[in-house]
Amino acid sequence: MKLHKLPQLVKKGMKRLGRGHGSGRGKTAGRGTKGQKARGTVPRDFEGGQLALTKRFPLLRGKTRNKSRKPHTVTLRVSRLSIMDAGSKVSIETLKKYGIVNESAVSVKLVAGGTLTKALTIMIPLSKGAKIDIEKAGGTVTAQ
């Protein structure tokens, strides 16, 4: 078997910087000469003193400021479904129609809690405990 046909088992390591002239990356270690970037650390979003991109937009300021704008899953207890008619299908649209969840809700998950007396057909994601409560009341789970 020839050496060049052997499988390559080891990844090539990163180049070690600043370890003398013999390494090929000594002295300035690939940073060029002088200047802020050669001497210390510069933030990734630094634009040379220009107003940063994150500050130029009025509502999107900062890196982690807009958590409320991201859609989140609404958790809903099984007992809240008791206002619905018996035998009705439970989906996000019907929950909005009955006013159980807000109109802006994107996803809903049912969790165990309270008691349910009506048989309903569930078409939204739910927990194992909620599934047991619904089946105990005579309802069915079609999809998750």
Image (tube, rainbow, N blue to C red):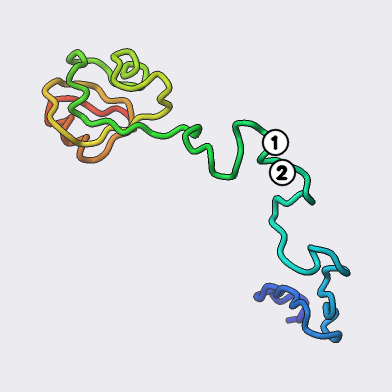
Q: Position of residue 59 (x, y in %)?
A: 60, 31
Q: What residue type is disc 1 on?
A: Arg
Q: In the rendered view of the protein, which quadrant contains the N terminus?
A: bottom right
**Residue under pointer 2:** 52
Residue shown at 25% from the left, 29% from the top: 141
Label 2 with label 1: CB-CB less than 8 Å: yes
Q: Image quadrant of residue 20?
A: bottom right
Vertically, is 120 above or below 49?
Answer: above
Q: Amino acid at mark 2?
A: Ala
Residue at image position (21%, 29%) is: 78
Q: Secondary structure at mark 2?
A: loop
For label 1, count other residues whose C-alpha is less than 10 Å away and answer few (under 14), some (14-19) or many (20+).
few
Q: Quadrant of residue 132?
A: top left
- Name the quadrant of the C terminus: top left
Horizontal relation, residue 92 to residue 51: left or right: left
Viewer-proximal residue, 69 or 47? 47
Position above or below: 62 against 48 = above
Percent of width and height locating residue 143: 33, 29
Q: Position of residue 50 (x, y in %)?
A: 78, 45
Q: Viewed as shown, does residue 84 lie left or right of 5?
A: left
Residue under pointer 1: 56
